[in-house]
Image (cartoon, rainbow, N blue to C red):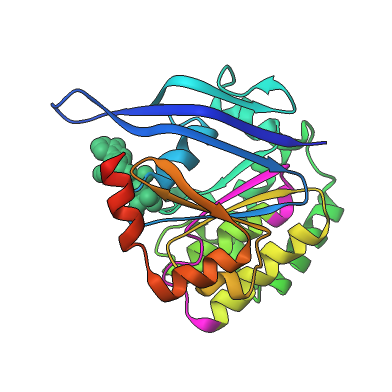
Amino acid sequence: MSTLEIRNLHVSVETDGEGPREILRGVDLTVRKGETHAIMGPNGSGKSTLSYSIAGHPKYKVTEGTITLDGVDVLAMSVDARARAGIFLAMQYPVEVPGVSVSNFLRTSATAVRGEAPKLRLWVKEVKETMGVLEMDQAFAERSVNEGFSGGEKKRHEILQMMLLKPKIAILDETDSGLDVDALRLVSGGINAVRETGETGTLLITHYTRILRYVRPEFVHVMAGGRIVDEGGPELAATLEDSGYDKYVKIGEAA
Ligand code: ADP
Ligand code: MG
Ligand code: MG
């Protein structure tokens, strides 16, 4: 199975000094295993808020609605429990973890998610091969997580994690932003490799249509003003490429 179901999700964020502010205002979304959904929308429409809310960021408070994974209440789970349940988030702005090597970080994550430490020899081979697919230098594994990484290295590291963790639901928040064409091709190849297993549901959050030429979604949703204001198939992405988000910004403001 593996179905993520979001129903009437309302989320507020605690602002500095101005009290809570409602960002998501009733989001409905269903992502099933094997499906790829693109969430598109203008800046500030709530895309990252949605991704944080699914992953369990403490700053984002769900005030109404539900999120379930295979019928199980995700909102009742800790951040760690969500990761163990198979929810993976590649953040728009990945955080640095000084003093922790990529290699240790990946093994710790895999151990946490799988419930047991992966067998060392197999694991080393798996990491090496996956890094090869992403054309990452092996020396990369000994660097501190995200410390001094270029934008492209951060994004590739997120995809490396995803490929190794094999999540049920992968949420990729602007993993395409700031990538040159070569890096975009590699990152897309990684996303497609996971997708082709048929075991993962993918939520591809993006501002631009560019990545959708490499990773073809079956479903496209447009967010504006904290709600999904339009939905369709891949043809909707093509329309957006021509017409932009202007129309949706107005709909979002009016709602
Ligand atoms: P997107 O990812 O679509 O660009 P975000 O989810 O990052 O949108 O932001 C949606 C809105 O919520 C924006 O107006 C943003 O300023 C606001 N917002 C998001 N996070 C916070 C926060 N931690 N504190 C205050 N405002 C926030
Ligand atoms: Mg943004
Ligand atoms: Mg964002």
Q: Which residues are magenta?
A: 163-181
Q: How many marks?
A: 0
Quarter assignment of residue 157: bottom right
Quarter assignment of residue 150: bottom left
Question: x%, y% of residue 110?
Answer: 71, 42
Question: x%, y% of residue 30?
Answer: 65, 39
71 or 233, which lies in front? 233
Residue at the outermost bottom position: 182
Using the rendered image of the protein, determine whether residue 81 is visible from the camera's viewpoint: yes
Q: Going by the image, does 152 lie left or right of 195? A: left
56 or 102, which lies in front? 56
The quadrant the C terminus occupies is: top left
Residue at (59% x, 20% y) in the render:
77
Quarter assignment of residue 225: top left
**Depicted 253 relative to depicted 116: above or below:** below
Q: Going by the image, does 189 lie left or right of 176? A: right
